[in-house]
Amino acid sequence: MSDDTRILSVRGLNVQIPIPGSTLWPVRDVNIDVGRGETVAVVGESGCGKSLTALAIMGLLPRQAKVQSEALRLNAESLAEASPKRWRQLRGDRIAMIFQDPMTALDPCYRIGDQMCEILQQHRKISRSAAMKRSLDLLGKVGIPAPEERLKQYPHQLSGGLRQRVMIAMALLCEPELIIADEPTTALDVTIQAQILRLLRDIQRETNIGLLLITHDLGVVAGMADRIVVMYGGEVVEVGTCDQVLAQPLHPYTEGLVRSIPVPGETEQGEALGYIPGIVPRQVGERTACGFVDRCPYATSACREEPIAMRDAGDGRLMRCILPTDGSARDPDVWILPDETSAQGATNSGSL
Amino acid sequence: MSPGRVALRRAIRHGGFWIGGTIIFVIVLMAIFAPLLTPYDPSVQSLSEGFVPPVWAEAGSWEHPLGTDNLGRDYFARLLYGARISLGLGLLTVIISGTIGTAMGITAGYWGGWPDMIINFFITVRLTLPVVLVALVVVALIGSSLWLLILVIGLLLWDRFAIVVRSATQQLAQREYITSARAIGSSTPRILFREILPNITGPLVVVTSIEIAHAILLEAALSFLGLGVQPPDVSWGLMVAEAKAQLLFRPWMIAIPGAALVLLIFAINLVGDALRDVTTPEGKA
Amino acid sequence: MLVYLSKRLLMTFLVIAVTSVIAFLLVHLSGDPAAAMAGEGASQADIETVRETYGFDRPLYVQYLDWVSRVVTGDLGRSTYLRADVTDVLARHLPVTATLGVCALGFALALSIPLGVLAALRPNTMIDRFSLWLAVAGQALPSFLFALGLMYLFGVYLRVLPISGSETWWHFIMPSVALGYYATPAIMRLTRSGMLDVMLSDHVRTARAYGLSPWRVVVRHGLRHAIIPVVSLAAVQLGFMLGGSIVIETIFSLKGIGHLAWESIQRADIEVIQAILLVIAVAYAVLTLLADLLNAALDPRIRIS
């Protein structure tokens, strides 16, 4: 991807939080690129640091968190060096974020119309009536029926799916270049999930914005993403196109994730699903070995000697593992342990 | 280690506990040993020696270190004996209000239902009544004696005890060890005394300190209005009332008992805050 | 909402009813009202005459019902000392106390809310500790001492404020501060903790995520939520102030109902005392009811459901 089609460029993003006695390091050396019209999915289980990464990109972490990066750029502008005032100008205008739970993300004390106009009037010099008109248009655009009434309603009067559509409409108000969606469908019914995802995809195609989609659900990713960034333990462990990663996962963690999804048409009833035993460890202090080594079925002594660097796996793919990429050392059945009683700690679709 | 000992350990490390505790300790000592600390009787008048200024003023001397009041009574002596009244009254009223309030709170919190509704109603009624006015009316119409004062204040200030104890009891009563105690057939009084009462001592101790301060302040206000402690007894509030006319020319006569009052209440509040800090499990905003 | 409202109204009514009984009993049982009215040095015959004239010889419940039936028609009795209808007397004195209460509350809110907000925005810094210490100190200072101190500093030493009477707005400054500051610690603490909670909430994060100005985030989306319980507390504190105004009014010679109560107690003017107790209790009950309603009204989730 060339520099001029890249909207978001993140290099070497680190987030550290001092705690009594040591330092939490929930985001480690993360690189992410999002291009115009591209959907990049950041995938990983709860606790892998993907939400914190999104918040760090938006500059929304509390004062105690120390955010460092080699580069954090929106188009050509460096966000890392931006003043607080500049950040406020950019947020909601050039980058917009959609949060997981629309019930708590919207302010229950104000009407929908008021909240939307407030955003528009913060970033544009327009009259209230013009702001209301634009809000109305966008509510219609995201598929909300009877939008005039919705403008006058309070968030608690809408259903979960409608609320999330409102959030999407809010994100589009100022025609941003990048939208970060943090688990946008996790709090919704399964049937509504599909609708919302389709909506996001349609909007993206129409407006050519970049979409950074944070999720733990590979099923969500499959239909939506152009590229996938897999995170584990605060680090990026694999990068590739959606097809590449899902068809042939390289990093053992990705492999475990992929094997744990039932495939309609292929997985037989009663067939055991794979799972990754253990739980995500707390990320404290410097790395001395591979972050995944305690849960990895392929682990060798070499994996414990020093931290693993990211390497080029050919075809534009990256992985943080020393295993060969030709698939020779892999065994898909290594993930299925049907007689193991350790049901606890299995990777599941828990939300953050 | 029992929660009591944990709390005690934390209290020992708490700055406010030490400062407040020391001040209270000193005041208590001074009150107890008052006859040793001053040769004067606080109510003996000596009109020829009226309005002697404190030792730091020009006409003052160590004979009357804090001066004398309009009737020639030694101020330091009055301060010390007044401490006895304030502290004694604070403790006695709290015993009365604490007993009433705790009994009501436990009843409401443990049994719930009708007893809870009734007791809540009583609390609401009590809160609706203006405390100072009610106390004034009773004392004015019946006649003022120290014991009546203690009784009236004690019968008026039980509301916070009831509220806090009720809430603490409610939380406890839902816990499993209570239901299991009941299941094995423990009688109710047994449960109340062995399970509930020991476990509400944390919040109870905190409320007690708050209410001691509250009682002392109420007495001071009543004495200031002339319907609290009566001569020949001494109270700091009474001293302020008697010195009110001297605001213009002899402000120290108000400031001295005033400062004593503020210091005592401040110390009690410090200790109360410290107790609150050490008895909450973890994490306060 | 309607069900809630009617329940609260019923409760309020019951509370007022019981309070009226207590007010009545207090006055009639604390000694002999006939003797108190007849005054000191009255002979036994005089006292008996008073007793018959004023109906103190009737059974208590009869006297009570008689009083209540008069009260609901607006007749609060007659002041023996002032030889006027209690209703008129109260109406003359009430405005002063009401003004005092409102100003005192206003002062308390103007001081504690900004302090509470600032303390929450910068926890564990200088401003936070300062407000905390102010709160602790505030609770240790009795209002009569504070009033005397203010009087000395501003009235005597600096001579910038008047120390008695109620003619102008200047007369209300010191009394309002002396009466209001005692509510400051509670309001400040509640604001602070409410703000600490709300600033961590999701909708504040959204407001920040959309680049809204700090003022909008803190006030429109933060304080708007945190203030709801504070409103309730403020109404309750106003009720306390009405009851506690007696000390301030006597010190500053403000002729409000607190002052009137004080004088009536000294003169054993029974009807007035009873009426004042009732009026203050009713005011407090109404204020707490108002506080609950405001609570519900401010939160659209309760209002519209």
Image (cartoon, coloured by chain):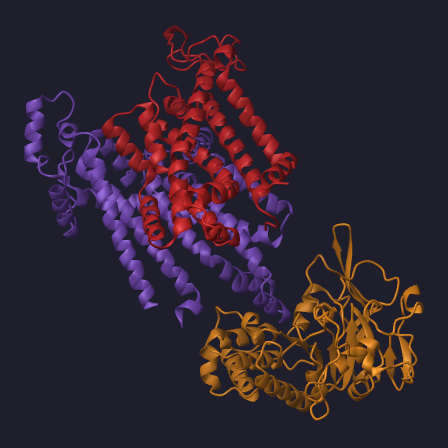
Chain colours: A orange, B red, C purple
Q: Is residue A6 above or below residue C257?
A: below
Quadrant including the C terminus of chain A: bottom right
Foreground of the two, A308 or A41: A308
Q: Position of residue A238 (x, y in %)?
A: 83, 77
Q: How many marks?
A: 0
**In the visual, does C197 lie left or right of C49?**
right
B193 and B40: which is toward the camera: B193
Find residue A13 and report its image quarter: bottom right
Residue A76 image position (x, y, % from top left): 79, 76
Q: Residue furthest bottom?
A: A265
Return the x and y of residue A132 as percentages of the image width and height.
51, 80
Identify the residue shown where x is 24% and y is 42%: C22
Please tell me which residue is depicted at 32% across the width and 32% down the height of the picture. Answer: B152
Image quarter for residue A290?
Answer: bottom right
Farthest-out residue, front? B184
Q: Is residue C104 visible?
A: no
- Quadrant where the N terminus of chain A is found in the figure: bottom right
- Image position of C270 with respect to B127: above or below: above
Q: For the point 48% across and 22% down, which residue is it? A: B256
